[in-house]
Image (cartoon, helix red, strand yellow):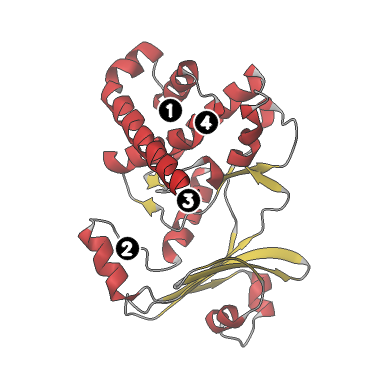
Amino acid sequence: MLYLRDDFKKAWQGKDPQLLLETMDGEVYRALEARRTFRFELNGKGYFAKVHGGVGWFEIFENFLHLRKPVLGAKHEWEALNKLHEIGIDTMTPVAFGETGNNPATLRSFLVTEELANMVTLEDFCEHWKKTPPSFELKRAIVLKLAQISKKLHDNGVNHRDYYLCHFMMPRSESPDPQHLKFYLIDLHRAQVRDQIPDRWRLKDLSGLYFSAMDFGITRNDIFRFLKAYTGLPLKEALKKYHSMLTQIEKKALKLYKRMERKSGQSDY
């Protein structure tokens, strides 16, 4: 499989894109045994490349033992990005994708996306709320925006699997307009696309989102606003219908929060 936008077709004409990216220099953001993420420039514009090598049979078997579908390469993210563009969720723009090989353990692939420049993660933006709480209007707008994105994502059969505030990007601004918020959902390499998502994955996404917001002054009213927008129901009806789901979300989020606290404490010794 190979897709190259016209400008990349011209720039890489006669070259093997997979080999080119595997040997290309750039500003490395992440380097794992089977995946490297780096920034490069072409024709004066910035791009990010994720280059995947084979994950090996051990990784594949380990995922199946834990009842998880293994991520074999860039195809998951390619499909998820195209799906998000189709349903109207702002995200990265893919410009090149390729996959080489038939053996799942040695599959090689790549994905190139346009750089999202002059952005900040929503997690970093909210960090200062610990000392300086936001205006009511801004906080309400952010909660509702996240609920709307989550609803559209899940209603269209997509679950993220790493659904945290750090994977939402927003244009850098000290005082964003609550009426014109724009979030970009990123890091979709583990995302899954189906006709309908199972409840366990819906719970994982929502509990991850709640966990990542717990330090930023989230109140019960914020949760209620999110629930109304996410379900599209009046609050009383939503609370009655989704009481069990809310309990499970809170339980999972607290469990994850305590686990991260333990890891943070251990790192001090």
In percent of width and height, residue 261 lies at 44, 40
In percent of width and height, residue 68 lies at 27, 56
Q: Mark 2 — residue?
A: 70
The image quadrant of residue 63 is: bottom left
Using the numbered discs, state the Cα–Cα distance from disc 2 to disc 3 in whole angstroms.
Answer: 34 Å
Name the element at disc 1.
Answer: helix
Q: What residue type is labelled 2?
A: Pro
Q: Is residue 189 above or below residue 265?
A: below
Q: What residue type is labelled 3?
A: Tyr
Mark 3 against mark 4, which lies toward the viewer? 3
Q: Judge left or right: residue 257 versus residue 148.
A: left
N-terminal label among 1 and 3: 1
N-terminal label among 2 and 4: 2
The foreground one among 22 and 74 is: 22
Label 3 close to label 4 by CB (< 8 Å) = no
Q: Mark 4 — residue?
A: 215
Using the numbered discs, state the Cα–Cα distance from disc 1 to disc 3 in whole angstroms.
Answer: 42 Å
Q: What residue type is labelled 1?
A: Tyr
Using the numbered discs, state the Cα–Cα distance from disc 1 to disc 4 in whole angstroms.
Answer: 21 Å
The foreground one among 95 and 74 is: 74
Name the element at disc 3.
Answer: loop
Q: Mark 3 — residue?
A: 269
Q: Residue 230 carries which label?
A: 1
At 62% across and 88% down in the image, what residue appears?
14
N-terminal label among 1 and 4: 4
N-terminal label among 3 and 4: 4
Name the element at disc 2.
Answer: loop
At 68% across and 78% down in the image, what residue appears?
10
Mark 2 against mark 3, which lies toward the viewer? 3
